[in-house]
Image (cartoon, helix red, strand yellow):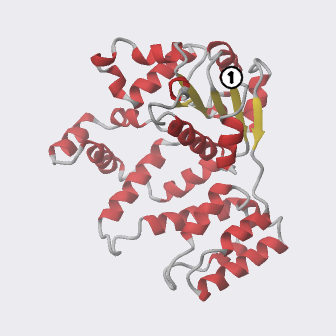
Amino acid sequence: MVTRLHVDLYRRIQRQQLVLLGPAGSGKTATMLILLIGAAKECVRPASAPERADTPVPVWVTLGGWNPDERSLLDHVVEEMETNFPALRHPRYGANVARRLVEHKRVALFLDGLDEMPAAGQRAALTRIAREAAGLRIVLTSRIEGYDRARAGGRLPRPVVLQLDKVESETAVEYLRRGHDSDRQRRFWHRLTEHLLSRPDSPVAEAFATPLILSLARDAFDGPDGDVPDPAELIGLTSVAAVKARVIGQFLERAYPSGSGRRGGRDQRHLFYLSWLAHHLRGRRDLRWWEIPTLIPIRDLSIAVGAGFGLPTAVLAGACVALAGGARSDEVIRASTRAIA
């Protein structure tokens, strides 16, 4: 479906703006990412292809940290480009190359998370996008209520709006039943999927209506016989939040097994890293990677660097040592569940 979306809508669309709407976990960001990958592939066609010269380069821009009352969309986009692609600041490209790329409409803006901005700024944001990104290809994601709030103050000129629906129980069942290696796993999933079909209003069916939880559950509860618990245990949970927490918790257990597992103590460090991220994500849905050094006391950062770690590992390891006493591992599950609620 997403592949067809790129070919039939993004590539052929005559309008400049595409808006992807849906509830949390409905796949907005994932859909936009796949569209971006498709657009990027068009930019690396053979040099002889006549379309290549006119193909704008897709640029991912997170909106959560933008204050449209204080700065322009252009300034925010340029900062994001120069931060994520520091090579753009190299002298061989000339001065202000990121800004010039936007001004000359050589980029397509993939704007993620209009609803993740403060509500007071959403109207101003949509107004600025409509005015300052005129002539640029735009893909914008938002929850429905965030987009409705923004449209009360300003509107895009002629957008194509696509609302992503929830996953139907029949579709979820088809996905969960295929591709299992053993009869035992097939029996486990059959019991759960029969419940989805007979109780489409149950907490587990409602949780599985979002692509994120559905895909996490398949990865978390699927594996060699005896290696994972029975996914049918989810049937007994009495709330959607409990189902999400159990799925995310089991997914993290599979990804980072306990220190007695085959990867030993490294996994405890991974758990510390995740706990540290959860600790700093309180109240926010986005943590910019370039802000991480500012969250670490300089003494701890110096010690970690001096210990011989690479910079990315040093930043996280130093933070986890400093915060290990305050950030509990179960914050990972709670913060992850809040992020998709």
User: Can you give x and y, in whole percent of width and height, for residue 196 in the image?
Assistant: 78, 71
Foreground of the two, 265 or 36: 36
Foreground of the two, 315 or 17: 17
User: Can you give x and y, in whole percent of width and height, for residue 126 in the image?
Assistant: 69, 21
> Seen in the image, is 43 located left or right of residue 187?
left
Quadrant of residue 194 within the rendered picture:
bottom right
Residue 212 visible, this angle: yes
Q: What element carries label 1?
A: helix
Residue at the (57%, 20%) spot, across then down: 67
Quadrant of residue 203 within the rendered picture:
bottom right
- Residue on which disc 1 sits: 120
Residue at the (33%, 17%) spot, across then down: 93
Residues packed near mark 1 inside 10 Å, few (<14), some (14 to 19) or many (20 plus): few
Counting labels gives 1
Residue at the (63%, 76%) spot, across then down: 231
**Of the residues shown, which amino acid type is indicated by label 1?**
Ala
Residue 284 visible, this angle: no
Outermost residue toward the front in this view: 48
Residue at the (41%, 69%) spot, across then down: 257
Foreground of the two, 8 or 30: 8
User: Can you give x and y, in whole percent of width and height, for residue 214 in the image?
Assistant: 65, 62
Residue 98 vs 51, above or below: the answer is above
User: Can you give x and y, in whole percent of width and height, for residue 317 in the image?
Assistant: 29, 49
Quadrant of residue 180 within the rendered picture:
bottom right
